[in-house]
Amino acid sequence: MILNALPVILLILLVAIYSLDKIIYLVAFFAPLSIPLHEIMPGFGFDMYLPTEPLLFGVLILFLLKVLQDRKFDRKILLHPISIAVYINLIWLLITSFTSTMPAVSFKFLLARIWFVVALYLLTAKLFSEGKNMEKYVWLYAASFMIVIFYATFRHIGYGLWNKQAAHFVVSPFYNDHTSYGAASALYLPFMAMFMFHPGFTKRIRLVSIFAFIVVFLGFILSYSRAAWLSIFVALIVWVILLLKIRFKPLFITFVALLALFFAFQSQILMKLENNSKQSSADMMTHIHSMSNITTDASNLERINRWSCAIRMFADKPITGFGPGTYMFKYAPYQLTKDRTIISTNAADGGNAHSEYLGPLSESGVLGLLTFLLIIGVVIYTGVNTYTRVRDKRLKLITLAALLGLITYYIHGFLNNFLDTDKLSVPFWGFTAMIVAIDIISRNQEKQANKIENA
């Protein structure tokens, strides 16, 4: 098998040496179609997504060699506030990898995070630095993602489109379950909607965009992912806030007031939730209503079990945690008998903390969570400021779509975590890179305009 693939590997290597951007495009296209190694070689002691992760590792090596040779990289990208927030997070992951209970697991996790950041954030931001290539990056992922949607929908038809249980496995082997599939569709829906109004597109391409929106929306609905549905609802609220230009201060006061009300009436709220016995279902309204069922819905109860384990793990190691990537290997002893469900497991293949926030808390301690929240906070702040400042209609739409897409994932992150996979890292870091690139472009344009005025 390896000998047969050798000519392709050599060709990709040559392309990478002379044009790293082509490799980034390949990664964006193949991410939805990538398959984990264990699907090809069951029982193998090492796992990665093929062909994307070997490509990303190769990009990392070539990037380091190029930087050592040229001794330079775009300083505006390297020193951007979002970049600095990312470095702080990576440095803390490095420190907690040294203190990890499973150093080999943690350093592998850290290495994967670094190659995602280098290829999909730093180099991709450079790729976007002239205001070009952003639509291409989105379309490449969307095109192959639509192939997955057609594949999953065709399989779903065989079980009945309204068979909610079938949604869990019809996306295999491309997505590990319906929740990551739903998260990806939610991330791309704002862009598919934006493309329908893109000022630079011809009428024919806009018709293609309408078709693409319908296909991605179909995948979104048939994912039966309640977290994805909730995330789009929140993104729509954010869009309305941006549209109405509501100021930050009253929003912050409202948020704090709602939080205070929640803690004041938490006992009554908990009693209300415990009275909800709606199970996840193919009926959409029942399925949405089941999100607040913490009494009998196995999916919700298992999430609470995983979250409780993460909090107990944090209580044991609040400063450095158990080590990046170790939750799935260490959480089992922290399960209480009363919290276990019919889908609970002690196996390391049983999944992770089901939270992009509690996972880092248990694995890297309090600073693991705070440094990740720092990235999100700086991205939202930069995204909103860039959206209000940029004058170019096309870049304004891209900023809005990227920001809303990322917000869907920030919300989804309360219920699931997928940033250790290429499937969600490609849009997560790529959309972040778009905001950085457009922020730099808009600031440059602002400086030039000020110079002209003062001349």
Image (cartoon, rainbow, N blue to C red):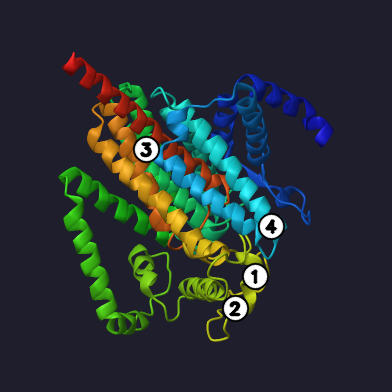
**Of helix, strand and loop, which one carries label 2?**
helix
Disc 4 crowd rating (10 Å Cα; few below 14, some 14-19, many 20+) is some
In the image: residue 46, left or right of residue 360: right
Disc 2 crowd rating (10 Å Cα; few below 14, some 14-19, many 20+) is some
For the N terminus, give its image quadrant: top right
Estimate the spatial distance between the alpha carbons at disc 2 and disc 1, rounded to whole Å: 8 Å
User: Which of the two labelled residues, at mark 3 and mark 2, occupies the earlier sequence position?
Assistant: 3
**Of helix, strand and loop, which one carries label 4?**
helix
| Tag 2 residue | 334
Look at the picture and state if 141 lies above or below 181: above
| Tag 4 residue | 105
Observer-nearest of 53 and 311: 311
Whether the residues at callouts 3 and 1 have beta carbons within 8 Å, the answer is no
Q: Quadrant of residue 67?
A: top right
Residue 396 circle label: none
Whether the residues at callouts 2 and 1 have beta carbons within 8 Å, the answer is yes
| Tag 1 residue | 330
Mark 1 belongs to which amino acid? Lys
Q: Is residue 5 visible?
A: yes
Mark 4 belongs to which amino acid? Val
Mark 3 belongs to which amino acid? Met
| Tag 3 residue | 192
Name which residue lies at 77% across and 50% down. 41
